Image: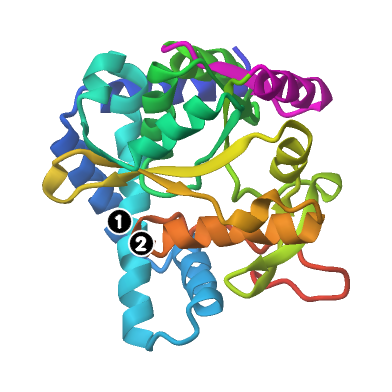
Amino acid sequence: MSSSASKALWIQRAIRLLSKLSLPAAQRLGRCIGYLLWWSQSGPARVTLTNLELCFPHLQTREKNQLAKSSLLHTGMVAAEIGAVWEWPAEKVLSLVKEVEGEELIKSAEAAGKGLVLLAPHLGNWEVAGLFFAARYKMAALYQPPKIEELDGYMRHVRERNGSELVPANKRGVMRLFHILRDGGVIGILPDQDPDRSGGEFAPFYGIQTNTIKLVSKLVERTEARVLCVCAERLPDSQGFRLVVQEADPAIYEEELLTSVTALNRTVENMVNRFPEQYQWEYKRFKRRPEGQRGFYD
């Protein structure tokens, strides 16, 4: 067995072991992971502080430290919840969703008879949000295969078990998204990843020039699809999750690319600002810089 296959096997075993935990137990474990990352001043802790210093320069040091610590606790919980989200029966996972805010926006979009783009930032537990919408709508999601190839089949299985179609992040996959939207379908996209040079446009995100996906703007321009932003907010005391649906910034429908991409970032900001401690600030969102500008994570 190759080293990558062996690693994939151990990861699957670890996820299945996590699935034996109740949600409260998984979240306690996740908080322990987050505490360890914070108190050891690990790489993720340093990246988190860097991002918060860039995005919230008005905060005092104590406030930034508290927000960084909370973010790491929630990131730890995302990791520990993966066993439940991927291995529990879909109905059991969906029972964790205790309320839905903004569901009327989904119904309004359906009534319009146009396609629908759901933006799901790395906020709360995005896997829960994806499963929730896949259970209710014929939905496709843009999919980036894992670096460990042997995990691909497993990840596709758990994410497609409720009827979601995973579309590869390549030219053929993008064409498939256009067809789905033109047929009035629903697609899900993570809007806050760092695309490659050809797929990105620099636009402000919390005032920082940030390499931002252009695909959403192009899909909207060519299909007249509607855009909503969604997330699964983690409720306190292991109560479960609240699904939150918000309108996108209206400028996302503008033909001018930079205007539209900037509105996409504002859409994400508006959602993140509701519960910033649940955003994955540990991600190097500003890694790619405009030509001639130094990196923030050096």
Q: Nearer the viewer, residue 44 or 56?
A: 56
State the quadrant of the C terminus: bottom right
Say whether residue 25 is left or right of residue 175. Answer: left
In this view, the mark in front (2 or 1): 2
Three-letter code, disc 2 = Arg
Classify 199 as above or below 103. below
| Element under disc 2 | loop
Q: Which mark is residue 270?
A: none
Residue of label 2: 274
- Closer to the camera in the image, 42 or 115: 115
Residue segment shown in magenta: 162-183
CA–CA distance in space, label 2 to label 1: 17 Å
- Could you tell me if residue 39 is visible in this image? no
Q: Which residue lies under the disc numbered 1?
A: 73
Residue 66: percent from the left, percent from the top? Answer: 30, 74
Left or right of 220 in this view: 119: left
Q: Is residue 31 visible?
A: yes
